[in-house]
Image (tube, coloured by chain):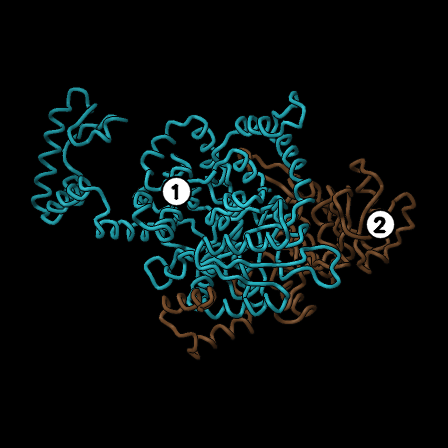
Amino acid sequence: MTSPRDIVLASIRRSLAVSGHEAPRRKAAADRLADHPAGVVPARGQIGSAERLALFAKMAEFASATVEMIADVVDAPSAIAGFLRRYNLPMQVRRGEDARLAAFPWEREGTLEVTAGVSDGAQLASVSHAFAAVAETGTLVLTSGRDNPTTLNFLPDNHIVVVDAKDVAGDFETVWQRLREKYGEGVMPRTVNMITGPSRSADIEQTLILGAHGPRRLHVIVVGSGD
Amino acid sequence: MTHAVTSSQFKDNARAALSDHDLQGALKFVEVNFIARRREVADRLPEFDALRDAARDIKNHTLAHLDLYLEAYETRVTAAGGHVHYAVTAEDARQIVLGICRKFGAKTVTKGKSMIGEEIAINDFLQANDITPVETDLGEYIIQIRNEPPSHIIAPAVHLTKAQVEADFRRVHTHLPADRNLVESTTLLAEARGVLREKFLTADVGITGANFLIAETGTSIIVTNEGNGDLTQTLPKAHIVLASIEKLVPTLEDLSQLLRVLARSATGQEMSVYATLSTGPRRADDPDGPGEYHVVMLDGGRSSMLGSDFQDMLRCIRCGACMNHCPVYHAVGGHAYGWVYPGPMGAVLTPSLIGIDKAGHLPNASTFCGRCEEVCPVRIPLPRMMRAWREREFERHLSPATMRAGLKFWSFFARRPRLYALATNLAARLLALFGRQRGRFASLPLASGWTRHRDFPSPEGATFQAQWKARRRP
């Protein structure tokens, strides 16, 4: 019996008038997969590191995120506590097991209660560490795993994301390359979340409202000063 | 609750739409908002048109090598622990989804927005099999509780006013206090969020669409603003991706080319809030994520479009820019088109997928103004393809006899330029003579279709061709 897979592939080949065995076609596809050529990369992101951080902040704020720059990671707990106080939120955050987050001097904020693990929807604020960011559009890139569970990106009302200044890239293509370096060619973590601003909907009369199913606030803390 | 295909009744649908007060009120937002927002964000990116060329070329390359990229994609999905199920027809796709839901004993299924889901009418089917589908995109949720199909491919409830949504929420959310304030859109959104949050946490299976599939990595991508698609796919035991063969792109680099034109063309954003890349199910060390990951790969008539006059339509990335810029869509909205794909892209795609005999009116519902092609991020020649459908319709004798007779009558004159000039000149003079009193006609023989709704102005002087000739002479 012919499988649905064989039927679909045969139909594609019939329409394209090919057999699937043509060497030049196979080479064209294999080369593209192996070389993954970059196409048009906007000039906007091709700038020095200080300007890149400024562009990232500008674009993220344009997408309604808030951005805070801190010089040293030791200031991260107070930046997080400051954000919670600003919005009168309880002094509680849920984080993943990311080693960088675990190493924060949390004890500097004695009243801040920090727990590690996934979100079940009961938490009001979470802290994640981004894999990278993209200045071109103000986008954060987060990868799934025990270190940064995906549920923390979507269930709590307030999402705080820490990113190292050196990980803020000018464009998406730089991030794809870093993913390949970390996970291997053709291999991806289960989920890569690219996040640009807080959740929103414009489904009612095209009026934009923040805070749909995901967080209504996205606060980004950039650590350090780049390369 | 099955939504019948009514594309063959486009004319009646359009007539009803024109006199629908609420619809006309809602449609005015389309024309104003989408167009201005796209223009603004496109102007901010100097490379925008170069990116459109690149996007077109990537899609063309992928379609020309589609069999090979599908094989590469499938290998990667399988390596990541996922499953690819091919579906020749919509019915095959429905059975595959049902099989997976049954395996998990699913009672409730949450859904992210999926046009393939609409195309295969998965909600009706699941309902008929005692599984409750819950749409979680705000627009999709609204039309689900109204038992309506979407009227726009990215803004499904764009045909509704806020007052209509408020009335529906009061009708359906009876567990909430009757005297609650729902005047603001923010309170409507908050109410939907509250109602749906519970569904996310209790659903057995989550179904999403896919904006793109990446051959290099075996990845599916959803692009959303609300975050509903992410909750849909992260929380349940299984994630089902409803996709189709033309969603494929070769590499991550190709994905970023397309992402750069998608949101800008669709909603006028630099980037949608969430672009999520999913590869396989929960890994051994993952604390969250779906236990199984299934991709339903629908053909549904697409493979036959390859190599045909309509292959270019398979480049479509479903941004909705063509309908946002279409004067016909602005006038009648999406439901008039009678199936899931409205506007110019629907006028080309619907006849390809369900047959020109059922959708012949759609390619005729165009003024050929060309705005759709002008804004298309993958440069699909939509007007040319609508014309190709018109020709086929004519060749297959599907157009009405009066229209065919009229065209024959006209072509008799059009092929005889002198006679044409003589006849139009005579007609213009006669109309000018009879119409000189009022300057317009309230009725004319053979033109009642026009004069029923507006007057026909009486000609003033010579025909266009005569004037053109006279003016060119210095």
Residue B190: x and y, percent? 66, 34
Locate residue A172: give its quadrant: bottom right
Residues at badges 2 and 1 in contact (C-beta under 8 Å)?
A: no
Work out whether disc 2 and disc 1 sit on a shared chain: no
The residue under the point 92% across, 45% down is A110
Q: Which chain is indicated by disc 1?
A: B
Please give the residue where the numbered disc 1 appears in the rendered image: B5
Residue B81: x and y, percent? 64, 65
Q: Which chain is indicated by disc 2?
A: A
Q: Which chain does cyan denote in the image?
A: B
The residue under the point 48% across, 36% down is B148
Q: Nearer the viewer, residue B294 or B255?
A: B294
The residue under the point 52% across, 64% down is A39
Q: Which chain does brown denote in the image?
A: A
The crowding category of the residue bearing disc 1, from other C-alpha atoms within 10 Å (few below 14, some 14 to 19, many at least 20), is some
Residue A215: x and y, percent? 69, 43
**Disc 1 residue type?**
Val
**Disc 2 residue type?**
Thr
**Residue B2 in view in this figure:** yes
- Checking the image for residue A123, the label placed there is none
**Which secondary structure lies at badge 2?**
strand
Q: Measure the C-alpha gap from mark 2 to mark 1.
A: 53 Å
Q: Nearer the viewer, residue B311 or B116?
A: B116
**Which secondary structure lies at badge 1?**
loop
